[in-house]
Amino acid sequence: MLTAKKKILINPKFKELWMQRLFFVISSTSIFILLLIMIFLFAEGIPVLKKVSFVDFVFGKYWYPTSEPPAFGIFPLIAASVSVTVLSAIISIPLGVMTAIYLAEIASFKVHEIIKPMVELLAAIPSVVIGFFGMVIVSPFLQDVFDVSTGLNLLNAAMMLGFMSIPTICSISEDAISSVPGAMREASFALGATHLETILRVVLPASLSGIITSIILGMSRAIGETMVVLMVAGGAAMIPSSIFDPVRPMPASIAAEMAEAPFRGDHYYALFATGIVLFCFTLMFNLIADHIAYKYKQTGDSTL
Amino acid sequence: MTNQFALPSIKYRKFKQAVFFTLLRFAAIINGTAIAIILFFLLKNGYKVINWTFLTQPPMDSMTRGGILPCIIGTLYLSLGAIVIALPIGIISAIYLNEYARSGRVLRIIRLGINNLAGIPSVVFGLFGLAFFVIYLKMGVSILAGALTLGLLSLPVIIGATEEALKTVPETYREASLGLGATRLQTIFRVVLPCAMPGILTGAILGISRAAGETAPVMFTAAVFFTPDLPSSIFDEIMALPYHIYVLATAGTEIETTRPLQYGTSLVLIALVFGMNLGAILLRAHLKRRMHI
């Protein structure tokens, strides 16, 4: 018995090999979980297709899950998610990319050390606190300034989401801009270009793939964000016609209705199916970002 | 005399640059002040309610008075549970990816999995936690189900941070250790991991702080509106800070009366999260100094 134990101990190659295999298995956990998430989402979401057809579900204009007979059309929810995300991108892309350029190219070390942590802290604020802030501070403000019936609307949600995705856009863009080799800047300066011309014609084109990746990841974060849209978007399941309309994006609908939906009833299945649609959106965003990052992976200045 | 390559005068170009740079600076200032504005309003409206009673008493009179102790404890349990689950898996995944895996299809697929896991909306994690842990594995709405869901959610954060930390360990350290006759495993556990520890710990704390602030995943899997008792086992339901804020701010009949409590709870949550972030930064600095790297 003892000798057998000893044998394993003094056989490092054996141990090494098995540990490596164990490590491999554990590192596959992420893939495994991703698959598990898909399986369970589909298992609980697909049964809704017994009630409504795929086309009626995705393009149906009416979401009245609790009325009799219920209507399960999530097009208003999709429209709300897309419009909130696009509007938030209009806010976050210029602010995020411009801040990244400022931090990477212009700011002095001291200013960089002040602004960078502030932007990073913005990312650390829990989303429910941002939602709360939007509810109690921004909403009355919007109501007063624009004289609209409710401050809980598309614009408010988009502003909050915009500021939530700025840190993502800013820090990934800044990394991309900083990784442009200094020699390229120097070459541009030597040709007589000003700093601005160097940034616009040399640095930005060279870091474009990183900036686009950051924008896609930022939008992916915005479309999946739950608490903010649950608290400040207003909650009306209709296709918005102005930026002051209250809306009900997909995550808000799932979070708000799950508690009341009868277990494994049609409403419950419909909410899981909404989760599948949301999952597909973010999966698409991530695959595109991953593809761009991989395809244009910068390996030295030779690939530029 | 027109030359198609002629540039506008240098004065104009410098002026254009000045305008642009002012815009850029302005954008950076807006971003920097955003956080200050949020903190200012929360502090202004919330500092009055924060006192010893608020931090050490359970809610009273159907949550219109009293404190938030059960929520603080619940959030601590959930985020610590999440990290206990995510840390070992995360560190080993990162070790495999950084120390063993050769670039190729397998590595690419694993990375794709991690990236996509990181991008899944938190509400979808909540749905998964509900379908898998709460219903399929019959854990019920419990600390365990919530901690597992949050653990999976913070896994990509931990893997990312650990990988970054492993990358900063110089290749020469590994070569020296292998050159002395150590096996790969010995090299990893006695040379690489100790050197990477500051980075890994920072990642772990950031993971906890992310888990502590999440609402959507715990509202289906662990949290309840109100429970008078502190949890006695991991199968109990609990209250959590983020969910408490949401409930007080939207679902109560006394939304206006409990406004100060909402501000106070938000402040406590922010203090917890920022405290952890600050702790992570200080710890990293301290360990780095001690290890001379």
Image: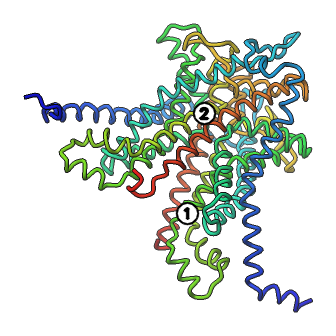
Instruction: Give the residue drawn at x 88%, y 23%.
Output: A266
Instruction: Give the residue drawn at x 64%, y 19%.
Output: A79
Is B152 drawn above or below residue A9 in the view shown?
Answer: above
For disc 2, the neighbor class at 10 Å (few under 14, some 14 to 19, many from 20) is many
Q: Quadrant of residue B105?
A: bottom right
Q: How many marks?
A: 2
Task: Name the residue that disc number 2 marks.
Answer: A129
Residue A194 at x, y = what percent? 21, 41
Q: Amino acid at mark 1?
A: Ala
Q: Secondary structure at mark 1?
A: helix
Quadrant (top left, top right, bottom left, bottom right) of the N terminus of chain B: top left
Residue B168 lies left or right of residue B7; in this view the side is right
Query: Which mark lies nearer to you, 2 or 1?
Result: 1
Residue A46 at x, y = what percent? 85, 30
Residue A201 at x, y = what percent? 31, 40
Q: Quadrant of residue B118?
A: top right
Q: Quadrant of residue A239?
A: top right
Residue A22 lies left or right of residue B13; in this view the side is right
Instruction: Return the mark for residue A107.
Output: none
Chain hosting mark 2: A
Q: Nearer the viewer, residue A6 or B224?
A: A6
Task: Name the residue that disc number 1 marks.
Answer: B165
Residue A4 at x, y = what percent? 88, 88
Chain hosting mark 1: B
Q: Amino acid at mark 2?
A: Val
- Cα–Cα span, label 2 and label 1: 30 Å
| Observer able to see residue B214 | yes
Q: Secondary structure at mark 2?
A: helix
Q: Seen from this angle, which residue lies furthest left?
A: B1
Is B101 drawn above or below residue A274 in the view shown?
Answer: below
